[in-house]
Image (tube, rainbow, N blue to C red):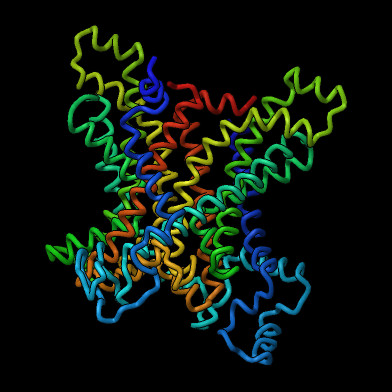
Amino acid sequence: MSRFLARRLMQAVISILGVTALIFFLQRLAGDPVLLLVSEGASQQAIDALRANLGFDRPVLVQFTEYMSDLARFDFGQSVVQQVPVVDIIGSRLPYTIWLAGVALLLALGIGAPLGVFMAMRRDHPLSRLGMGFVLAGQSLPTFWSGVLLILLFAVTLGWLPASGARETQSVILPAICLSLLSMATFARVTRTAVLDELSKPYIRAARAKGLSMGQAVRRHALRNSAIPVISIAALEIANLLSGAVIVETVFAWPGLGQLTIQSIAARDFPIVQAIVLLGAFVSIFLNLAADLLYSAVDPRIRLEGDN
Amino acid sequence: MTASSRLGRWLPPRLWVFVAILAMLALAALLAPWVAPQSPEAQNLLGRLRPPGTEVRGITYLLGSDELGRDLLSRLIYGAQVSLTVAALSVLVSGTIGTALGMIAAWSGGWTSTIIMRLVDIVLSVPAILLAIITVAILGPGFINVIAVLAFTRWPRYARVAYGQTLGLMNLPYVRLSRFMGASTLRVLSRHILPNIIGPIMVVVTLEFGLMVLFEAGLSFLGLGVQPPTPSWGAILSAGRNYVTTAWWIAVFPGLFLFLLILSVNVLGDHVRDVVEGRR
């Protein structure tokens, strides 16, 4: 176990260092990073002053070392536009994104997983076919379109829910539904496959033979075992929900990190964009690691393989 | 066996509707100048925000008109061109680069392999949409840049598959014989390895194509894709949001086209995967 753990941790650390370097060199490869920061039509003098001010006139390797050591101290620099530390700006927006993604995750898991169990138990039920249609559609639905449809139906036509912003408690409902659809479809599909896999195994037939009903066999035996792939998918889905928030927050004017990303690109506030992308990468690397560890914790066969 | 039942076994009838949708969109894109009823950029200030089916001075707006009086159907037909071209080119570029790098990594081993496959892990560890957004923010928007960004973001998917497949083939007797007889690396990779890994690569291509359509539209929606006045579905939809209370059709129809395209690609892609992996 410890060797598997150590190797997996090592991989995560290398990925984090690699991503950090990748983002740094991307900016340098693309040309003068100062040009990303100034407004269009700035004078050469202003550009030179900013370059010296930010230290972009020094050798690239010196800049890289400083960039890495700043990041190690969680110093993401200053916002070019607002002249406030990036960390403060991100800190003020982060709770909104966590709230939105959290509600979306609850919806996706709370509806998707039971739907998957139902589709596995009653394969030929008309509702199961409808469910499969939803799974197929959910995976092909662009969030910026489903968002507009939700706004049209529930905000414009019916007037039940607010179309945008985050002023009221119920404002979260429409964006959370919009964000959750893809994950909901994924959970339904994965749960259905997992339960079907379990149902075909001998122990279920034994349980049925000793007189348990289908429902009892599923509840007492199959569900626990089929939870393994669903749990590990959940970690990956959190990462998908967080990056999906970029578009959903733009559609619903939700004041989280996603909206901040797009606003910062428009305002050419590059330190913020860079910090958000790094944050997203770190979270996603961490969640992937968590998924692997979770998986190996519940299924001993995996860590045995890793030890070889 | 009759021809139609043979076709039915290869491509079940329930999938024909998706083939038809794809074919219609591809034809519309290809023949846009002939099938579009209007120029996609022709403005008509008397015909602003007209609902679908309205006629203004002899011009019928089948799917309505936008805020500048441009015919929505014509813009969507030209938008299909953008969507399909960007998706096809980015799949082609990322597929070629990724497959080549994956084969090279497997073939050469050692440091070359470590560096390439580490880079694959690193690029894949950044959420794809975030990586696409930051690279487009650095490079700037535009047709070529979007393709470059999508190719850069997605090549590792192909590299991973090509790497694994090549490793499995490298030590088969016919490949070893070919090397033994003095074939160059290029010849072995292109004549003996590539034809045998193209199946799994095509599976990735079909899965990626829908994603590329979605990414292009998403970037355009955020204002980071192909720039106006070139009609892109994502950008049309984004502009339509401002008129959602008065002119719903501007935002609804581009999304519908997008949904149908991605759905068809995904359904047919699943089928291709099943066929290649021998599940049917």
Is A136 drawn above or below residue A262 in the view shown? above
Number of labels in the image equals 0
* Residue A96 in sight from this viewpoint: no
Foreground residue among B135 and A114:
B135
Q: Quadrant of the N terminus of chain A?
A: top right
Name the spot of residue A292 as percent of width and height, x first: 51, 37
Residue at 39% in and 62% down: B234
Foreground residue among B261 and A71:
B261
* Residue B179 in sight from this viewpoint: yes
Name the spot of residue A76 as percent of width and height, x first: 57, 70
Residue at 48% in and 70% down: B227
Foreground residue among A298 and B183:
B183
Name the spot of residue B37 as percent of width and height, x first: 33, 64
The residue furthest right is: B182
Q: Is residue B270 left or right of residue B177?
A: left
Is A71 drawn above or below residue B274 in the view shown? below
Name the spot of residue A269 as percent of width and height, x first: 53, 76
Residue at 75% in and 17% down: B173
Q: Quadrant of the C terminus of chain A?
A: top right
